[in-house]
Image (tube, rainbow, N blue to C red):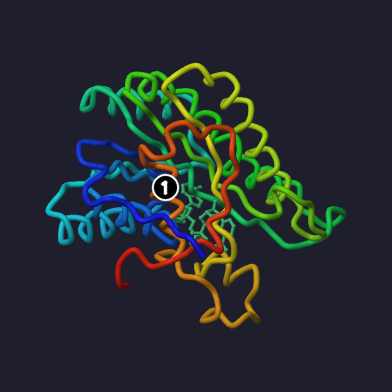
Amino acid sequence: MIYYQAKNNFLNKKTLLITGAGDGIGREAALTYSRFGASLILVGKTKLKLENVSKEIKALTGKDAKVYELNLLTASLKQYQTLSHKISENYLHLDGVLHNAGLLGVIAPIIEQPANLWHDVIQVNLNAAFMLTQVLIPLLLKAPNASLIFTSSSVGKKGRSGWGAYSASKFAIEGLMQILAEEYKNSNLRVNCINPGSTRTNMRLSAFPEENQMQLKTPAEIMPTYLYVMSHDSVHQTGISFDAQPNCKKAYPE
Ligand code: NDP
């Protein structure tokens, strides 16, 4: 199976923002992009987790990552605007954004999905990604080339019984990605989705508690696709939903 082999330091002088960067796939993406030279803005709910990732980045690369605590469930448009303003005070542009934060909600048939949880999942997985994108597009358009990445799921492409709000939110993310890709097709901004596939994280564990976690790919193993979609090699690719599996290989030992 072919996997993407990124060139050393290909993200030098690039500034990337990642949501949900404190844990799971987002944490691994932050460490990986940083190892390839990127400067990172880490956004997430739990400040301590973000600070720990920032420390790991410092130890690995000597770089200082910016930490920005933001609860995507409760954040107002004003808070997104403040974040964008703070970034523009420190950087001329953004080279990439990875919308990675996600909420599972409950696995239950539609008739049993609690309305409040439905709202929360749509708020974190869809509305937050919309608002953050809206305030960051001006910074992305100032970059020579920029990559905007949303995180999808196999249940965002084919509905599956019991996956309720989560599945609906991922279908909507695929749609949002396609709309943006069309709107910016004549610009420097490319817009794509990545479906990580089954990956060994807390979210996967809570969805499938009975599963043997050791048989799943680790976040590190799915990074080749994350590197490719952020790299100059994908500069002409927009409007695509990439599957991170099975094109996997650890970029580094864990
Ligand atoms: P994790 O649960 O391990 O990580 C989710 C991340 O999202 C955490 O950093 C979490 O922060 C953050 N987050 C959750 N709620 C909020 C919030 N309200 N505000 C800010 N940040 C928040 O999940 P994964 O790493 O597995 O998932 C990453 C992405 O991949 C998600 O979009 C998920 O839907 C998608 N995905 C995962 C698959 C898998 O098998 N793992 C398969 C398909 C898609 P905190 O830890 O502080 O709560």
Above or below, 238 relative to 39:
above
**Which residue lies at the image location 44% right of the left edge and 25% below the top edge?**
189
Give me the residue at 53% from left, 66% from top: 199
Crowding at dot 1, Cα within 10 Å, few <14 / some 14-19 / many 20+, comes out as some
Vertical placement of residue 46 versus 98, above or below: below
Asked if ligand 1 lies within 8 A of label 1, the reply is: no
Which residue matches tag 1? 228
**Residue 113, percent from left and from top:** 78, 54
Instruction: Measuring from the top left, give residue 112's x and y in whole percent.
Output: 83, 57
Tell me the quarter of the picture where residue 245 sits.
bottom right
Task: Single out the residue that lies furthest toward the front.
Answer: 2
Q: With 52 as the anchor, is 74 left or right in this view? A: right
Q: Secondary structure at mark 1?
A: helix
Q: Amino acid at mark 1?
A: Tyr
Looking at the rendering, in which quadrant would you find the C terminus? Answer: bottom left
Give the residue at x 74% y 57%.
163
Lateral position of residue 177 relative to residue 54, left or right: right
Residue found farthest to the left: 62
Rendering quarter of residue 81: top left
Q: Is residue 208 left or right of residue 86?
A: right
Vertical comparison of 25 with 191: above or below? below
**Closer to the camera in the image, 244 or 234:** 234
Residue 21 coordinates in the image, percent (x, y):
38, 52
Given residues 217 and 120, the one toward you in this image is: 217
Looking at the picture, tell me which residue is in the foreground, 145 or 67.
Answer: 145
Q: Residue at x 46, y 18 (%)?
A: 187
Front-lying residue, 236 or 51: 236
How many numbered marks, from 0 up? 1
